[in-house]
Amino acid sequence: MSESKSSIIELDGVERHFGAVRALDGIDFAIRAGECVGLVGHNGAGKSTLMHVLAGTGIADRGEIRIGGTTESAYSVQRAHALGIRCVFQELSLCPNLTVAENTRIGHAALKGWRWNRRAADLIMAQLDEIFPGHGVLAGDVVGDLSIARRQMVEVARAFTVTDEPLRLVILDEPTSALDAHTAGQLLSFVRRKVGQGTSCILISHLLGEILETADRIVVMRDGKAVASDAARSFDRDRLVATMGGARELAEALQGATDRPADAPLMVSVQSNGHGSGTQLIAREGEIIGLAGLAGHGQTRLLLDLFEAAQHHRSGRHGAGTVVSAPAALVAGDRQTDGIFPLWSIADNIGVGSLKALRRGWLISAERERALAASWQQRIGIRTPDLDNNILSLSGGNQQKALFARALGSDARIVLMDDPMRGVDVGTKLEIYALIRDEARRGRTFLWYTTETDELDNCDRVYVFRNGSIVAELARHELTEEKVIQSSFAESGM
Amino acid sequence: MNYARLLRHLLPALSMALILIAIAWLNPRAISYFGFTLMLNLAIPIALATLAQMFVITINELDLSIGTFVGFVGCVTATWLRDAPLLGIAVLLGSIAVYAGLGALIHLRNLPSIVVTLGMSFVWQGLAILLLPQPGGKAPDWLLAVMGYKPPFVPFPIVAAVLIAVLVHFGLMRSSYGVVLRGAGGNAQAIGRAGWSLLRTKVTMFALAGVFGVLSGLALIGNTTSADANIGNGYTLLSVAGVILGGGEFVGGRVSPIGAVIGALTLALAASPLLTFMRVPPDWDVGANGIILIVVLAARTLIGRKGA
Amino acid sequence: MQFARNLFAKPWIWSFIGALGVWLAAVSSTGGHGGGGMITAALSLAVFMVIVGVGQMFVITLGPGNVDLSLAANIGLASAVAMKTMDGNDSLVALGLLAALASGAAIGAGNYALIRLLRIPPIIATLSSSFIILSIDISYGRGLQIKPPPGFADFTNIQVLGVPILAIGAVAFAACAGLVLQRMVYGRSVLAIGQNMRAARLAGIPVEPIRCATYVLSGVFGGIDGALLAGYFRGASVDIGNEYLLSSIAVVVIGGTSVAGGKANVPGIWGAALFLVLLLTMLNTFGVSAGMRLLLTGLIIVGVITAAGGRRAAR
């Protein structure tokens, strides 16, 4: 009970569903003043959803939210702000058409009246100077012109600015993903200083080293629940990975993996930065190639370029210096924007990758479509009573399986994967890893961009990206998280 | 400063200069106090309608009914506002309320503004025809006095244009709530997450469009003295052209009130006086509007690509 | 009962029910006379709405922001082109139809060029081109009413047992369109693009060629409509297509196609066309003025789209 009184906010048995997806499956969470909690978990464990509930931008379907011991009946964004709870989301919340000062005004209703622009500018500049000395941002800069790194700096700084509403808890979701090592370090030491002064912080990061260094307490999430909550010093990297799930099973599964013969036909060859000066990426038939590095450093761009090159190859045009010698399919990671057709059934979503092949004469054969969907349902294990149900009736993991079925069911020999395990539960991930390895054995080539370093264990070779170019090539036997992170922060060209 | 953005900001002024040079070359006597007053007297209603459209475009919507709405306001002005002023005022205020209501409807039901405003364009047109089946009516005397005012040295249309542009510029680009309104066009989700009401921003912008639509209709009748139901029909396209020529973009919340007014003046010059001086056949009056809009947008695209 | 429940679940059934309701109201107001004649007249006029409605449906299904506002001008120009080419000569009918088709196709291609090359949003592009086409039509047709060849005009007015031959053709046309939509690669592609353009591209669908084809198709249907209208009304004119712009969008929306794209409905176009035509006929019977007609049409559009609602934004 005394713990309730000293908590800023408490969640009790909170659930949040999106259709059939159980993003939060009964989670208990509490945070006290002056505490830094690190939140870790695989993609799809529910971290973002938890954040949304805490920040008031997502309504819990079930469970209680308690502030200072009393239950909240109508929690909302306004209430959260009034209580001093701020959030920096992973997708940036700045308006690209407004200046830095104007965006600061957006965050504070109190910045109005005479000379509001001057006050907003002073406020944000002071905060940027405090967190990131030497930042180089001007209050009059239009956000749309700033680099992603600078935008992230502005957004983080804005979260810490104070006008009339208090600041008690700041939630940071992957705040260093766009920052280089030096700036990331500035941010984390600032967080420690602030926490020491009594402000609480929830830090979500994939970089376990950051979490272990900065947090007082670590909460591990898995499949929508909190599976561990303990002081940071009682954790080490191995314990964290084990608790997050999957490591042991994966290690066992990989024992049967074999090496590919070195003279298999060349499937893909491309200069990593298009100017002919970066390292060359090579993929041979049957290989699984990993793309690593911090998010947004050119991996997705490369996959999209290769996809386009494959399209042109089909129609006879050839790009300069890029070789893609077979049809390619792409499995998107952001299902909503890049993959799912929300009005269609599961069968339709699978069949859309093979429309020409499903024809009999001029018309698409309903029979062939059904057969294709059914065969993949069996092979990949899509859990549904009826393939004609709408795709959104599937859980997130099964939706992703449908997208895999679409790509694998087509005639593509090269499969490009853009961080496809986002929002997928651990059990599904293991099934899909096995499927990928199986398909690779049968001669398909995979290029796999992932933000989960552990997944790279599936790959034969890994290329690490930094600022749009490849800075390192690691074979499987040299692969460790430290090496990957080191290379991610390295200056390109060294 | 971004090179492309600089060019985009200068485009309206450059186009206006170009048109003025062309007019001066074709008919030097047009460049005078009297000449400008004559050429630009229809520019004020166009400028007001353009600003109305600008408000709507700022929040990533489009108003395809502004033309027929201006026509409807014109018909009300030439009839009720003169003969039964209280009724006329009530109707005009009521129509602004309707505009605000449309904003709410579009937000709450997540409706596409194209279809809603296309339907509304027929509503306003129908109402205008019901009110004035034949051209006629007469503008109220006070309106004629305002629009007929002749200030010393600078022609009235220019004075009015500058005033309107400065007013809206300060309201939208410099005020603290104007930031929220523009932000709603740039990243509505961010505005919502910061705790602002997106419903209120939509209603505000549509209401402002209604207000400026009413002002445009008043100004139009103040110039033409009588009304007819179809008088505003070309304004829909002209208003969109004016916003784009003025440096605005269809999505993203990037607009410029001053640019929009300059754009409207440029179009007013290009749409009629220039064509007359160039002796374009009357068959092509309508088509010329379409070509102008395409040329404007093409110029914008090319500039955007160069600067990119 | 299962059959009835399935029937009522279909989105297009409501437009037919609406049409039936209006017909009953109109018939009851005339004391039961002329019901059959009303249906025949309605079928004749609905044909022209259906033809352009199908084209508009494909365009709208491509996704939000896609609409062809050049249809009215397109129809006007096509009617003049067809009639001038036919030149009152029955042997030139085929050539005239081809010319109208070509004119429509050129307009569609022009629209797409504006959209793609100059990156002009479809609404603005088609609106601007409609003004240009109007001017072309005015100067080309010189405002004269050009008469169709007698054989062609008679053909378009033939009725078989009270059912206009054009209506039979239009029903077959709609059936083909439905097949193309659901069972051909082109139709599936349009539906995919409308739901999620980016996902469609990443699934290997050639997005830009499909969009081009769709705008050209809409133009072609406008061209056919113009030629047929000139035959049916025995003369081409600039204004002949004016009411078909809003009608084309109305029948698509009322018929159950989603304006957000990705979901389309062909039978509903017929139901909505009948509904609109019968409504206008009823209003005419009641002696409703032009202004009132416009007002009511506009209110119905706004009402229907409000009731249907838009797509909920992705979370």
Image: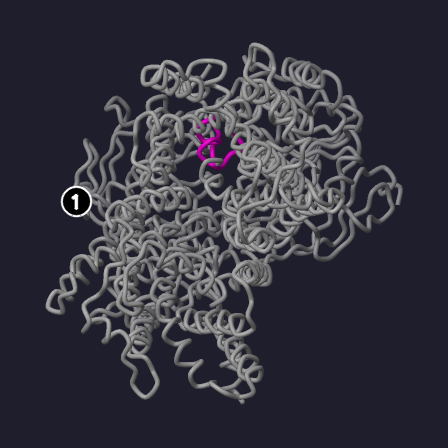
Q: Residue at x 75, y 35 (%)?
A: A81
Is C203 placed above or below A365 here?
above
Question: To which quarter of the image does residue C96 belong?
Answer: bottom left
Q: Is residue C159 left or right of residue A323?
A: right
Q: Secondary structure at mark 1?
A: loop
**How many numbered tags mark residues here?**
1
Residue named by callout 1: A265
Can residue B178 be seen at all in this image of the molecule? Answer: yes
Counting from the top left corner in percent of width and height, residue A246 is at 51, 49
Most extreme residue toward the left is C91
Counting from the top left corner in percent of width and height, residue C47 is at 35, 71
Instruction: Judge by depth and name the residue closer to the eye, A77 or B283.
Output: B283
Question: To which quarter of the image does residue B178 belong?
Answer: top right
Counting from the top left corner in percent of width and height, residue B71 is at 55, 44
**Secondary structure of the magenta portion, mostly?**
loop
Is B51 placed above or below A384 here?
above
Q: Is residue A99 magenta?
A: no
Is B125 placed above or below C226 here?
above
Residue bounds of the magenta highlight: B240-254
Instruction: Judge by depth and name the residue closer to the eye, A55 or A188.
Output: A55
Q: Amino acid at mark 1?
A: Pro
Q: Is residue A252 left or right of residue B70?
A: left
Q: Residues within 10 Å of mark 1 (few under 14, many from 20)?
A: few
Is C243 placed above or below B188 here?
below
Can residue A206 be seen at all in this image of the molecule? Answer: no
Question: To which quarter of the image does residue B283 belong?
Answer: top left
Q: Residue at x 79, y 29 (%)?
A: A165
Q: Is residue C218 left or right of residue B224?
A: left
Instruction: Judge by depth and name the residue closer to the eye, A351 or C159.
Output: C159
Counting from the top left corner in percent of width and height, residue A217 is at 70, 35
